[in-house]
Image: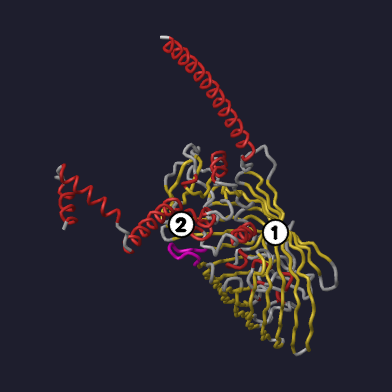
């Protein structure tokens, strides 16, 4: 009997002891759960994306490109070699609001006389309400084929050292209106047969001379209108083709040298085809320029470029051509406005993620003479 | 002979008590025997098979997309998700702006995004790709990276147009996001 009592007492003690421990364990779990919830909410607040929050400041990004190169040029005038700096290309982007973004590309260039020049190459504010409609205002690159829309002033992103001859910038004696100032409409349209991308511009158009970009005014009331459309067919990832059209009235230049009392009607139309994947890069474009003044002048040019990636090394070849009808008053005195054929062969070595070494040889057969050029370039993004 | 009888009785499931006794004695005798080489080989092959199965079951994990719960989406094609990560599609059908998140570096999700979705050599090409796309004004800022799957889920949950690529096995069951199967992704 005595043992039974002791046993009952022990049982009771055990019961109350255990239940007490159980209660304290429950409290601890509740506390831990509260703590986890608190930490979770703090984590959510800290990791909350800022895009789309109208009260947070816009997300600003500053990036840049640069390059330095060495050229050796052997022509009938003799041979010359020189180092050159490609300038500092700063591009600043900002997500101003959920569907509003801004980009500017500022180029610090070095002139042949040693002067430093600051060019605002691009400055665009873009509103993107739908995939099929984006509206941009500012200065950008005219939709004239694949290259001009995809490669700008940072040479690091292009495979080759130099741009195609046809697409040289205005201040490098190029014959095309590479830049526009005005309004641009772009968009992607998903069609049953593929992805259709369009670009439509209305801008100030060309100035009185090729180098004059009409940034804040227009010398005549006629606006430059351009349109480009590209199709990437379904099932052919990386392949695309398209065409472009541009119409402009170039203002007269009665005080110019030579004097040009009449306006010029300019019509440009062209086509492009490309295939770009991880290994292969094939680009080809063709543009025809028509200038109508007292008589008509037709000019055309194009290129075909092929590159193949072997891991970090990309050998490439490009064929360039330019046919310019002599006598066009708008191209008077322009060094690059002549018949040219050029073969370029070279390779690019991506030695770092954001830097590349390029070495290329160009054989240029122009009306002004034959030249052989070797260029070595170090390009980088920062 | 005894073995044959045992097999017949055992498979026939009509073992009698006396026969069970015989079976036991047979088992006792067989276990005392030194195992043959083929038996050992079979045993190890069996263990190896089980180990491979276990490893396969732990390493196999489906890569999926996760989107905000506001999105009315259950599956997406490989082409569609590629267009999203290339900036060719920037808005959801409900008009919400798509907010991209990049998976954690050196993860299965990142590898899948680079190689299978974007068809790049490896994930080292992704920064270069977004540098190009920003320069072309396709994006104003690069996609935001996440620390891990939980971080991806939290960020997507907090962002109405958010999308991220994650491994389904690492996703918590209580994550407040919608899992979207990527059709064509193996």
The answer to whether one can see residue B98 in this image is yes
- Residue name at image x 66 percent, y 45 percent: A96
Disc 2 target residue: B79
User: Residue A26: image x %, image y %?
Assistant: 52, 23
Magenta stretch bounds:
A229-239
Q: SS class of the residue under badge 2?
A: helix
Q: Identify residue for label 1.
A: A122
> In the rendered structure, the residue with mark 1 lies on which chain?
A
Secondary structure at badge 1 equals strand
- Quadrant of the image for the C terminus of chain B? bottom left
For the point 57% across and 49% down, the residue is B101
* Residue A295: x %, y % from top left: 64, 77
- Against A12, residue B91 (above or below) is below
Residue A41's mark? none
Front label number (1 vs 2): 2
Of B82 and A40, nearer the camera is A40
Task: Name which residue lies at 54% across and 63% down.
Answer: B120
The answer to which image quadrant residue A51 occupies is top right
Q: Position of residue B147 (x, y in %)?
A: 60, 47
Would residue A76 be found to the left or right of residue A177 on screen? right
Distance in Å between CA atoms under marks 1 and 2? 31 Å
Q: How is the image coloured?
A: secondary structure
Asked if residue A235 lies in the magenta stretch, the reply is: yes
Crowd tier of the residue under label 2, counting other residues whose Cα lies within 10 Å: few below 14, some 14–19, many 20 or above: some
A115 to A54, vertically: above or below: below
Q: Is residue A201 visible?
A: no
In the picture as drawn, the residue positioned furthest to the right comes out as A114
How crowded pointer 1 is (Cα within 10 Å; few <14, some 14-19, many 20+) is rated as many
Q: Mark 2 — on which chain does it sit?
A: B
Q: Nearer the viewer, residue A152 or A34?
A: A34
Q: Quadrant of residue A234?
A: bottom left
Residue sitting at 76 percent across and 71 percent down?
A: A68
């Amino acid at each position: 009997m005595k043992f039974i009592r002791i046993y009952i007492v022990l049982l009771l003690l055990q019961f109350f002891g255990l239940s007490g421990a159980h209660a304290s364990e429950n409290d601890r779990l509740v506390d831990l759960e509260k703590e986890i919830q608190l930490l979770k909410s703090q984590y959510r607040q800290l990791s909350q994306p800022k895009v789309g929050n109208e009260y947070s400041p816009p997300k600003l990004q500053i990036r840049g490109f640069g390059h330095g190169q060495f050229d050796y040029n052997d022509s009938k005038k003799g041979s010359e070699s020189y180092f050159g700096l490609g300038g500092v290309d700063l591009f600043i982007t900002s997500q101003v609001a959920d569907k509003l973004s801004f980009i500017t590309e500022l180029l610090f260039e070095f002139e042949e006389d040693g002067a430093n020049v600051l060019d605002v190459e691009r400055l665009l504010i873009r509103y993107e309400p739908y995939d099929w409609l984006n509206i941009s205002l500012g200065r950008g690159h005219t939709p004239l084929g694949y290259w001009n829309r995809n490669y700008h002033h940072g040479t690091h992103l292009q495979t080759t050292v130099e741009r195609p001859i046809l697409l040289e910038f205005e201040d490098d004696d190029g014959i095309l209106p590479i830049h526009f100032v005005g309004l641009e409409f772009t968009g992607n349209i998903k069609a049953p047969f593929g992805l259709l991308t369009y670009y439509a511009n209305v801008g100030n158009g060309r100035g009185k001379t090729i180098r004059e970009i009409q940034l804040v005014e227009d010398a005549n009331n006629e606006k430059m209108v351009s349109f480009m459309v590209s199709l990437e067919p379904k099932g052919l990832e990386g392949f695309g083709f398209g065409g472009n059209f541009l119409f402009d009235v170039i203002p007269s230049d009665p005080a110019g040298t030579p004097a040009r009392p009449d306006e010029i009607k300019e019509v440009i139309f062209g086509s492009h085809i490309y295939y770009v994947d991880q290994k292969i890069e094939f680009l080809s474009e063709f543009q025809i320029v028509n200038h109508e003044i007292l008589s008509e002048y037709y000019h055309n040019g194009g290129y075909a470029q092929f590159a193949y990636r072997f891991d970090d090394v990309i050998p490439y070849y490009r064929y360039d051509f330019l046919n310019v009808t002599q006598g066009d008053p708008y191209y008077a005195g322009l060094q690059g406005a002549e018949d040219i054929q050029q073969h370029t062969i070279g390779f690019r070595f991506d030695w770092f993620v954001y830097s590349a070494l390029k070495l290329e040889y160009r054989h240029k057969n122009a009306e002004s003479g034959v030249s052989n050029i070797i260029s070595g370039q170090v390009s980088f993004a920062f | 002979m005894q073995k044959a009888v045992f097999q017949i009785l055992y498979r026939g499931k009509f073992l009698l008590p006396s026969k069970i006794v015989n079976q036991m004695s047979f088992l006792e005798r067989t276990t005392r025997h030194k195992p043959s080489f083929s038996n050992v080989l079979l045993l190890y092959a069996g263990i190896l098979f089980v180990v491979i199965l276990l490893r396969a079951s732990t390493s196999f994990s489906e890569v999926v997309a996760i989107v905000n719960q506001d999105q009315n989406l259950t599956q997406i094609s490989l082409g569609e998700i590629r267009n999203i990560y290339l900036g060719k599609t920037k808005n959801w059908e409900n008009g919400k702006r798509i907010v991209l998140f990049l998976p954690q570096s050196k993860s299965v999700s990142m590898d899948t995004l680079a190689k299978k979705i974007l068809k790049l050599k490896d994930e080292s090409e992704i920064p270069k790709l977004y540098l190009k796309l920003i320069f072309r004004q396709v994006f104003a800022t690069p996609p935001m990276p996440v620390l891990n799957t939980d971080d991806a889920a939290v960020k997507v949950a907090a962002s109405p147009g958010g999308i991220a690529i994650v491994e389904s096995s690492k996703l918590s069951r209580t994550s407040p996001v919608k899992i979207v199967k990527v059709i064509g992704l193996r």
